[in-house]
Amino acid sequence: MARYIHLTDLHYWSLVCNPLRMLNKRALGTLNLLIRRRHQIKTERAAGLITLFQEMDIDAFLIGGDLTTTATEEEFRQAADFLGRLTMLAPVYLVAGNHDVYTFESKRKERLEKYCQYWLPDEDTAAIDRLPGDVPLLRIPTVRPNLLSSRGSFQQDAATSLQTCLSEQQSQPMIVLAHYPFLPQTAAYHLGLNRGLGNGTTLRRILGGSEQPLLYLAGHVHVFSHTRDPEHPNLEQVTTRALFYAKKDRPGGFTEIQAAGAQFSVYPWVYRDGWQREALSSP
Ligand SMILES: [Fe+2]
Ligand SMILES: [Fe+2]
C-alpha cells in the first residue's frame, strides 16, 4: 500500500505596503486580505502539520497550487520553505494555482519558477511521472494570469500533450493533479463563469474519452468534495480543503489517498481544534 497526501491552497500571505506596488490587481487582493484573510489563514499550523506527517509514513506529497495569495517574493519564500520541509519527508509534486501567477508582473518575472522550479514539471504542458508505489501521476496545467477574474484556462498545447500522455498509459489507473476542478459544480460548490476553468468541457471530454480509471485531484474551491462524473464513470473528482483555512463554513484540511493495486481509497482530513481524519469517502 502506498500513501499520498494531496494538499492545496496554502495561500501564504504577506502585506504589500508600498503604494507603487499596489497599482494593479494586487491592490484589490491586498484590500481583500486586510479585511478577511488575515484571520482566516492560519499558516502557523505548518509546524504541527509537519510533525503529523512525520508520523504518517507518506510516499509522496501532491500539491495543487495557490501556494501564495498575491504572488509576492515574500509569500513564495514562505511557501518554498514549507515545501522544502515536506521534501525532507517524501517527494513533492506541484502544479501552479491561479494565485501563483496572480499578476502579469509575477508571471513575467517567473516568480513561481524562481522559488519552486524543483517541484514543478519541466514544461508547462501535461506531464506524467511515476509515484513511489508505481502509480502514474499526470499533472495538467490549468492557470494563467487574469486582469480581474480568477478564471482558469485549459489550452490547446495542454490538450495535445494530455492526449499523448493518456495514449501512452494504456488503461492503468492513474492520479491526475490540477488546480481547477473539471466539474463546474457539484453538491459542494458551484463555479460561476468568473471562477471556473475555461475550456473545462474539452478537458473533461478528453479525460472521459480515455476510459481509463482516473482519480482527479483539484483545489481552488476550498471545500472537500468527492464526485463521480455522471457522464464519464471512469472519472472520480476530489476537491480538497484549503490547507490552513479557519472559516466556520470552510475549515482547513488535506486529503489522504491510499493506493493498493488498482484501488484508491480517499480519506479527507479536517482541522477542528487539531487535525482529524474523517471516514473513508466514496463518490
Ligand atoms: Fe485558492
Ligand atoms: Fe485558485
Image (spheres, helix red, strand yellow):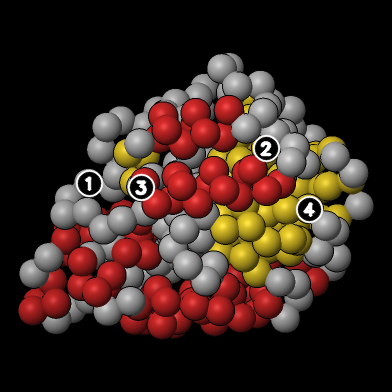
Residue at 61 percent of width and 81 percent of height: 84
Q: Earlier in the sequence, mark 3 or mark 4?
A: 4
Q: Residues within 10 Å of mark 3 (few under 14, many from 20)?
A: some
Residue at the disc numbered 2: 214
SS for dot 4: strand
Q: Please tell me which residue lies in front, 166 or 32.
A: 166
Q: Residue furthest top?
A: 230
Q: CB atoms at circles 4 and 1 under 8 Å apart?
A: no
Relative height, residue 222 to residue 130 (above, below):
above
Residue 235: quadrant of the picture:
top right
Q: CB atoms at circles 3 and 4 under 8 Å apart?
A: no
Q: Earlier in the sequence, mark 2 or mark 3?
A: 3
Q: Residues within 10 Å of mark 2 (few under 14, many from 20)?
A: many
Residue at the disc numbered 1: 149
Q: Residues within 10 Å of mark 1 (few under 14, many from 20)?
A: few
Residue at the disc numbered 4: 135
Q: Is mark 4 within 8 Å of ligand 2?
A: no
SS for dot 2: strand
Q: Earlier in the sequence, mark 2 or mark 1?
A: 1
Q: Earlier in the sequence, mark 4 or mark 1?
A: 4
Residue at the disc numbered 3: 155
Marks 4/1: CA distance? 35 Å
Relative height, residue 43 to residue 165 (above, below):
below
Residue at 25 percent of width and 38 percent of height: 194
Residue 205, position as x, y percentages in the image:
49, 28
Residue at 44 percent of width and 26 percent of height: 185
The C terminus is located in which quarter?
top right
Which residue type does callout 2 highlight? Leu
